[in-house]
Image (cartoon, helix red, strand yellow):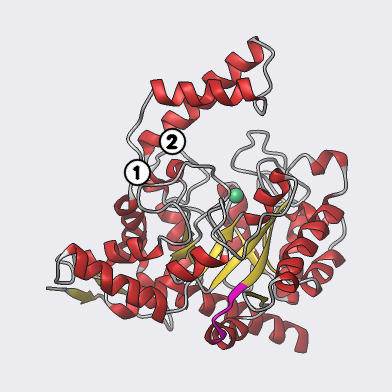
Amino acid sequence: MRVVAVIGCLFAGYCVGVSGSDGQGGSDEELLAKAKRLAQEYIIVDTHIDAPERMTELKKEDDLSVNSKGQFDYVKAKGGGLDCGFMSIYIPASYQKTGGAKAFAESLITMVEGWAKRWPDKFVLVCSAADVTAQSATGRVLLAMGMENGAGFENDSSNVQYFYNKGIRYATLTHSKDNLICDSSFDTTGTWKGLSPFGRKIVEEMNRVGIIVDVSHITDSAFYQVMQLTKAPVIASHSSCRYFTPGFERNMSDDMIRVLASRGGVIQINFGSFFITDEYRKYADNMEKVINEHLKANGISPTAAAGKEYARKYRKEHPVRSPDVADVAAHIDHVAKLVGVDFVGLGSDFDGVGDNLPTGLKTVADYPNLIRELLKKGYSDDDIRKICSGNLLRVWAAVENVARMLKSH
Ligand SMILES: [Zn+2]
């Protein structure tokens, strides 16, 4: 039995439903069969896939048209019902020191464009919410692009329009270090105490041009300043709930989720294990420290065979409970109970977190397992449609509308 209590429209235009915990009826097998059907029937948009970064690390391009070694490719996407993946145009913070961020971003964009050219019957680039809906019927896997790290804009706000013209539809304001735009949750320097004056200009320009502001990776102060400034709803393209990982600023606090939702935005849940459980996050933090210290003391490079072997051995000797797909569903459920089912979606971070992924949620073939967990929790078919893409497409269209309005004035 499914119980849904509608607690009213807390936010203009959005009805907030909270699903009960009795679950949809049926055996595990029946629920999985239904989940597989819904995954194929509904549009699934995942806002953070690091396939370009994986290719960069491989130093060659893998064949994405077949069942590859990666967590994203055509075969897995079709199997899991993924319609549209935002390819992350990820710019490491090191470019902020060396320069060349814009050129590097362009090289990754050219790479993604190349996939659509190389396999035109399997991939196609999309650049609007309406495009996603229209093209999803063609059976191809749709590629959208988000730039992870506003460092790509360098020190010139006219680059916002430049990257829009290149197909970038969201931009994460910073990554692991403070940049010219704002402070990073992974950096304790606090360069700007939030947004810089240039960062304010960038947010305004993103609103005007129609690039979605992505608040993943930024500090809490930067987030609240963005929320005061932005004229359009924003997304967290790949963040989870801090409720489950206390003190981990990279995830969003309940208060931040409330503010995000009150402005019509959406949090796209990151599947990476250290975003999901406190136990795994602490384990991963400690493991990284121990391994790095050992490698440094012995002059071993982390990418050398001996470095990789040490890390493998350490993991084997120090096992930890891996989160599973139900733990990820708990994050979605937390957001839905906090602010409603209209403000949560999927931002896996596939190909960006190594093998630190929950049991049952290892590649883009696995979305049905997550949908099964939501069915178990009593989410309606329409709730699932919203989580899979409806909410994100609503935000994307709203950002496009705000840009049109701002341009016409
Ligand atoms: Zn990231």
Q: Secondary structure at mark 1?
A: loop
Which of 108/241 is in front?
108
Which contiguous range is marked in magenta?
138-142
- Whether residue 236 is visible to the viewer of this picture, yes or no, is no
Q: Residue at x 72, y 48 (%)?
A: 56
Q: Residue at x 48, y 53 (%)?
A: 270
Q: Check residue 342 in the rendering and tell me which mark sits there, or answer none.
A: none
Which of 239/376 is in front?
376
Q: Give the side of residue 23 with respect to residue 257, left or right.
A: left
- Say if the magenta span includes residue 346: no
Q: Check residue 323 in the rendering and tell me which mark sits there, or answer none.
A: 1
Extreme residue toward the front, this view: 66
Q: Quadrant of residue 404?
A: bottom right
Residue type marked 2: Arg
Q: Residue at x 72, y 39 (%)?
A: 191
Dot 1 or dot 2: first in sequence order is 2
Q: Give the side of residue 157 with respect to residue 29, left or right.
A: right
Residue type marked 1: Pro
Is the CB of the residue bearing disc 2 within 8 angstroms of ligand 1?
no
Q: Nearer the viewer, mark 1 or mark 2?
A: 1
Establish if 239 lies above or below 186. below
- Quarter containing the C terminus: bottom right
Q: Which residue is mark 2?
A: 281
